Amino acid sequence: MVNERMYGLGNEPSAIRELFAYGLVRKAEIGADNVFDFSIGNPSVPAPDAVKQAALDLLDQPAVSLHGYSPAAGVPEVRAIIAESIRRRFGVPASAEHIYMTVGAAASIAISLSAVTQPGDEVVVISPFFPEYKVWIETAGCTCVEVPAHVPDFQLDIDALAAAIGPKTSAVIINTPNNPVGAVYSRANLEALADLLAAKEVELGRELFLISDEPYREIVYEGIEVPYVPSVYARTIVCYSYSKSLSLPGERIGYVFVSDAMDDADRVFAAVAGAGRALGYICAPVLFQRVIAACVDEPSDVDAYAENRALLTEGLSALGYEYVEPQGAFYLWVRALEDDAQAFSDRAKKHELLIVPSDSFGVGGWVRISYCIARETIVNSMPAFKALMESYRG
């Protein structure tokens, strides 16, 4: 007999993936140029030339060392290079012994949750949130507690968090820059969260972990600061991916960093390594571990996303759409033209616009539009957005 929960997850994929799959079919039917696919965060900006060159250089190395297993936690020299980069860039202590290489941030978060929770615990998320958080939390045997962000700035609502954190809470997941809204939590906002967690640890007599999901760290606009969370709260676990910063989503490479600042970092890291073992997330792809070592400080091409952001926001503003100005990442959070976000998304499909309804992000009445796509798609989509707007006005 199959596991019914797993059957359900496999039989009903995420709304984002389902829309993406629909788009592939539709493009085959009517041509890719006639479908305006804003569904998935799949960067259109190519990986830096340094990434290609590093991969080519590595392919000349002996196959046994290049394609053989690494230790479960990753290649030691790669972990050391990443730790050194963290120390240099963010001015915090970081040791190679607290870096665990993973197949992207998804594995990082799943590992971290299993490492610091017990079945029956609660994990707090900030809505709107990346839908898979709930899947990974429930797979760890925990309950997902949704706390709405403060509106209209979508910063952390400290009072709401204070009310939600209780005797069963083990961790809080934050994502800054945020998917789907694009908000970047300010240092003052994060410091208020850190003070709350420290006070709650004393009140509840238990450790509270902050899991910081950071695949969009490098993608910010107008020089806005993205505070490094371990510098604000000691009991932080960073889940990082190079999928967005280096345009490598298909290579699935990232890491977990257990902050050296926490008093029991060695024990927590051992739990991370144990969770990786239990879940089968060991020996991340060695070729791309070594590519990352060569390109660890390679900058992201943010200019292309900034241009797309301007094109999209100016175009939608002219048509009368309401949205949240994104400070980072590459998504636009747009108010649906009716309360039912799914119905709005379905109507948009009739105009070949593929936009993700907000229901799976934990709220209603909005859609997420991904603008990490070809510039031409945004330009060519404007008549469709106009027709969609007119279908409601008419």
Image (cartoon, rainbow, N blue to C red):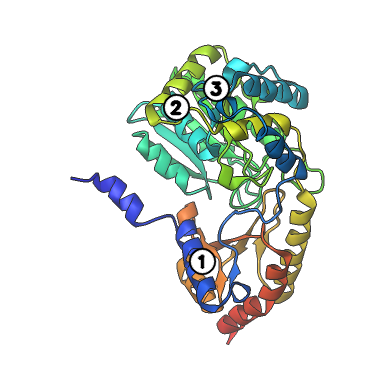
Task: Note whether residue 238 is visible.
Answer: no
| Residues under numbered marks 1 and 3 in contact, where contact means CB atoms less than 8 Å apart | no
Residue denoted by label 3: 199
Image quadrant where one finds the C terminus: bottom right
186 lies above or below 12: above
3D distance between C-alphas at marks 1 and 3 = 49 Å
Report x, y in % for residue 340.
47, 68
Are there few (<14), some (14-19), or many (20+) residues within 10 Å of tag 2?
A: many
**What residue type is disc 2 on?**
Gly
Task: Give the residue type at disc 1.
Answer: Leu
| Frontmost residue, 238 versus 279 | 279
Residue at 74% from the left image edge and 55% from the top image edge: 305
- Residue 73: give x, y in percent of width and height: 52, 22
Q: What residue is shown at x 69% (from left), y 43% (from top)?
A: 246
Secondary structure beneath dot 3 equals: helix
Q: CA distance from mark 1 to mark 2?
A: 33 Å
> Tag 3: Cα neighbours inside 10 Å, few (<14), some, or many (≥20)?
few
Relative to 82, say whether 214 is above or below. below
- Identify the image quadrant of residue 353: bottom right
Q: Residue furthest left?
A: 1
Amino acid type, label 3: Ala
State the mark number for residue 55. Answer: none
- Of badges 2 and 3, nearer the viewer stands 2
Which sits earlier in the primary sequence, circle 1 or circle 3?
1
Q: Secondary structure at mark 2?
A: helix
Residue at which label 2 appears: 276
Q: Is residue 29 above or below residue 177?
A: below
Q: Which residue is mark 1?
A: 24
